[in-house]
């Protein structure tokens, strides 16, 4: 009996010497406050892949959104002053003007594309100058970008989407735009009805994006992107034309529209769209796979690195791997 009691006492003594694991948020806060803090290196820190609770994920998201906002504003102040975005060899000048009072949730953004194409630069410049004064929304930021080229397909080339992504981010960062209220105006048949087409703007403003829509239909064609709402994929591995349909029903996500799961297909999730404390089921072709999601700082970081969109940040990634079964 004495030996047994001594053994228990020794075990308790050893357990007492094991240091308690530090919570994730103090580590993140300490790193963000340090001189060595780097956005690019943040996801490689030891704490970044540790599982978070729902409240920790919400706190981490707030901290990372603010840090990312500060860094991007510092990086991009020059291009806002110059009114020109430069990505690689392509330059996209832009004009913008603000109208009305700013709503509590943020301003609307109207991106108005000029016509032309397949014409000399002076012709397309004239089209752009005309576009700058074409519409005046009651509320919002009105932006008229100048196409980077003078080709016939001005707005349908591979460099356009990255430039538009950056333009929208800049307007969110500097002009307080609500990313759920972004509208594209493209009069491909010209300005019509003696300006009465301007009535389309208040009609458009009645609609807003739902970033966590219950059903997503994604056709990867033309110039594929790595993410669409809460779906992601490797754009380089898709040959084009693939269709993915994903629909949420409670804790189950139904996948359809393809014969084999596209490479790199990913479900991004947060606590607004799913209960991440509970298992999530992926169903495809009458086969179901059940997984337990994990929230991590690394995932929040990747979400904000892909796109600065504070209304559409994810804390969990669920790969759609083959075979779709445990």
Image (cartoon, grey):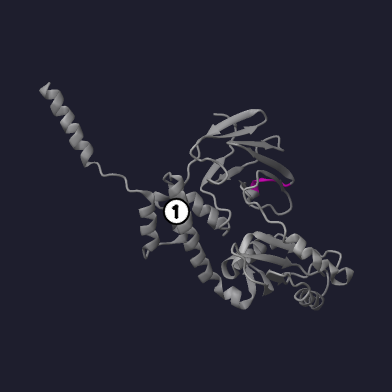
Relative image position of residue 204 (x, y in whole percent):
75, 60
Q: Secondary structure at mark 1?
A: helix
Q: Quadrant of residue 78?
A: bottom right
User: Residue tagged by mark 1?
Assistant: 59
For residue 155, say whether it is visible.
no
- Stretch in magenta: 236-240
Q: Is residue 285 above or below residue 96?
A: above
Q: Is residue 4 above or below residue 77?
A: above
Nearest the viewer among 167 and 180 is: 180
Residue positioned 40% across, 62% down in the render: 37
Q: Quadrant of residue 29?
A: bottom left
Main SS type for the magenta part? loop
Q: Quadrant of residue 4?
A: top left
Relative image position of residue 212 (x, y in whole percent):
62, 48
Furthest residue to the left?
Answer: 2
Residue positioned 44% across, 56% down in the render: 42
Furthest residue to the right?
Answer: 193
Residue positioned 32% across, 48% down in the render: 22
Nearest the viewer among 176 and 126 is: 176
Relative image position of residue 314 (x, y in whole percent):
54, 49
Q: Name the quarter where the N terminus is drawn.
A: top left
For residue 160, say whether it is visible.
yes
Tally of numbered tags: 1
Relative image position of residue 242 (x, y in whole percent):
72, 43
Nearest the viewer among 282 and 36 is: 282
295 within the magenta span: no
Q: Name the quarter where the C terminus is drawn.
A: top right
**Neighbours of disc 1 within 10 Å: few (<14), some (14-19), many (20+):** few
């Amino acid at each position: 009996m004495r030996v047994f009691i001594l053994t228990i006492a020794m075990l308790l003594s050893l357990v007492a010497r094991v240091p308690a694991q530090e919570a994730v948020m103090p580590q993140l806060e300490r790193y963000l406050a340090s001189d060595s803090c780097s956005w690019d290196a943040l996801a490689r820190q030891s704490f970044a892949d540790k599982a978070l609770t729902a409240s920790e994920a919400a706190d981490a998201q707030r901290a990372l959104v603010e840090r990312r906002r500060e860094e991007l504003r510092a990086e991009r102040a020059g291009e806002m002053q110059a009114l020109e975005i430069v990505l690689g060899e392509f330059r996209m000048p832009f004009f913008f003007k603000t109208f009305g009072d700013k709503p509590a949730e943020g301003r609307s953004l109207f991106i108005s594309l000029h016509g032309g194409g397949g014409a000399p630069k002076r012709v397309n410049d004239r089209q752009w100058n005309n576009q700058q004064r074409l519409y005046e929304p009651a509320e919002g930021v009105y932006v008229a970008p100048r196409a980077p080229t003078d080709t016939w397909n001005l707005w349908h080339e591979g460099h356009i989407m990255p430039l538009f992504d950056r333009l929208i981010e800049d307007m969110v960062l500097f002009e307080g735009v609500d990313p759920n209220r972004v509208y594209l105006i493209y009069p491909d048949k010209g300005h019509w009805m003696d300006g009465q087409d301007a009535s389309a703007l208040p009609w458009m403003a009645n609609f807003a994006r739902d970033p966590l829509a219950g059903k997503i239909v994604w056709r990867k064609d033309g110039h594929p992107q790595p993410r669409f709402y809460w779906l992601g994929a490797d754009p380089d591995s898709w040959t084009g034309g693939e269709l993915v349909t994903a629909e949420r029903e409670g804790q189950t996500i139904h996948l359809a529209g393809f014969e084999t799961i596209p490479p790199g297909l990913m479900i991004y999730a947060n606590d607004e769209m799913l209960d991440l404390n509970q298992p999530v089921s992926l169903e495809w072709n009458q086969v179901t796979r059940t997984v337990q999601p994990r929230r991590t700082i690394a995932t929040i970081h990747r979400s904000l690195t892909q796109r600065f969109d504070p209304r559409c940040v994810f804390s969990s990634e669920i790969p759609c791997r083959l075979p779709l079964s445990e």
